[in-house]
Each structure stands twice: as C-alpha cells, then as structure tokens.
Amino acid sequence: MMKRVLLVLLAAVCVARPAAQSKTLDIYVVDVEGGNATLFVTPSREAVLIDTGNGGPAASRDADRIMAAIKDAALTRIDALVTSHWHGDHMGAMAELAGRIPIRHYVDHGGNVQPAAAVDLFLQKVYPDLVAKAKRTSAKAGDTLPLKDVEWRFVTSARETIMKPLPGAGRPNPHCAGFVPHTVNPVSGQPLGNTEDEHSLGSHVTFGKFRALYLADFPWNKEFDLMCPNNRLGSVEFLLVSRHGQHSSNSEALVHALRPRVGRFMAGARVAAERS
C-alpha cells in the first residue's frame, strides 16, 4: 500500500472530531505569525506539541490558535510539550497555554545559554511552577519519547547531534562536497556564536514508513555536523524547514539529502499521514 500524505488548510475555527482512535498521524502546523507551534496527534490520541509561539501581547492570540488545533483534534490534554529552545517566538505563550489545558510532560534541552531578561525571568519564576505539576526532561541527542504508535527521537540537542545513523541511513552525503560554511549570519549579518539556535532540540518522528523532521532553528553550520560526511537521517516525507525558511539554515547538505515529499515553512495546515 502506498502511503498517503494529505495537506489541508486549517480554518480559524475548527470543527471537533470524535476522540476515537484513528489510523493516521495528524500534524497541525499552527499559524503563530513568525514563531513555531506544531501539534502531533498519534492514532492512540497521544498529543505532542513542539513550541508554543510568541510571548508578550501575542501570547493570548497564539494560545487561542493552538487551542483551536487542540479542539479540532478533540484533545483534553497535551502528553508532552517539547520546547525546542529558549527564544520568545518558540516558547513565549507557554504559561498562557498551560493555564488552558493540562500538560503532562515538559521536554527541553536544558538551561538558557543566551541571556535575555524576559526568558530568564520566565525560567526563574514561572517554569519551575509549571514543571512541578508535571514531569520535566532535559533531553539529549539520541533520547526518545515514550509513545505508543510512533518512534520519536531527538536527533539534536544542546549543540550535540546523534552520532549513530538512524535505521536505513548512514550513506555518504554527496551534497557535503559543495558545502560552504557561514562566517556570519546571512540574514542578520551578525557574527556567529553560541546562541540558543545551536542548542535547538530537533525531533525525528517515524510512523510506519512515514518520517517527519523538525530541527527548529538549528543553523547552517551545525547541519553539516549532523549530515556530513554521511547522512545520518536518511530521507523524510515531511520536513518542517528550519529557522522559518531562512537562508541561515536549510543547506543543500540537509534539505537535498533528505529529499522531502512535503516541505513546509508556512503555517496553518494539517498533515495526515497513514501508516504503510
């Protein structure tokens, strides 16, 4: 049986579906206007959310949009919230969302390495109270999430990458030969350094023969560490492109080697993948 990947637009107001077990892995890419919030719902109705969008005045708006996806999926809780890194456009609405729906497990890469007043205050005053009511894991590259229907593996974390190829991967990557490292950020023009982007917690999800990947803001030069000289990830069907589609990530060594069937950087969609 050939796998089917269905991409449909999400409306602002979604119609709830029964919470019965389904046959698909549903991926909601929520429009949080420049940030990220991506919801995965397994056939057994386990829910994993990567990131929570923007903070400040936008927190309520982004929490509303995440909750619209949660309502569409007929969920009553989030089983795991994966925070890719401590930038405000990826974790800003966390407290707002946690006040609306139970979150059982918080997953991150560890502490913030790029001092920022709002983020540091959140980690000192708010995050401890949230995780005290649940479970917290600081995941390392190679760790997995315990889920029933899918294999969820973290392939990057805290500047580290997996060293052992995933099953079926590990072949020489021909796109490494032409790789040119960045000396400055090509978008901002700022010098490269040890930022939260390099520490991004990247997720690889396997459902039958369907594979999805999201590396958050993992930058260009670190992609080389992951994919060269051998491709440790193989190919994927669905790629949520890094750094919001910017040229500071998404090198040929990564994207061309992965050969995704669906590449997504614009938000506001649901992907439904059937096991094959």
Image (cartoon, rainbow, N blue to C red):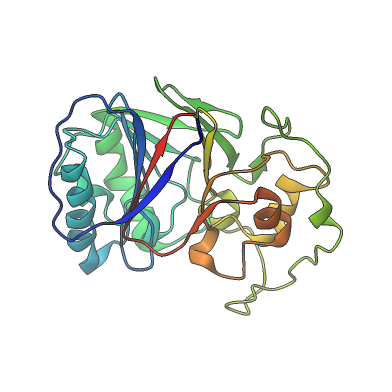
Q: Quadrant of residue 145?
A: top left
Q: Quadrant of residue 234?
A: top right
- Residue reaching furthest to the bottom: 189
- Residue reaching furthest to the front: 1
Q: Is residue 273 left or right of residue 175?
A: left
Q: Is residue 250 left or right of residue 107?
A: right
- Residue 29, visible in the rendered structure: yes
Q: Where is residue 74 drawn, in percent x and y?
A: 16, 37
- Residue reaching furthest to the right: 177
Q: Where is residue 83 drawn, in percent x and y?
A: 41, 45
The residue sitting at 48% across, 50% down in the picture is 112
Image position of 240 with respect to 276: above or below: below
Image position of 193 with respect to 25: above or below: below
Q: Where is residue 52 drawn, in percent x and y?
A: 32, 51
Q: Where is residue 25 drawn, in percent x and y?
A: 37, 35
Q: Is residue 235 left or right of residue 98?
A: right
Image position of 215 with respect to 267: above or below: above
- Residue 204, visible in the rendered structure: no
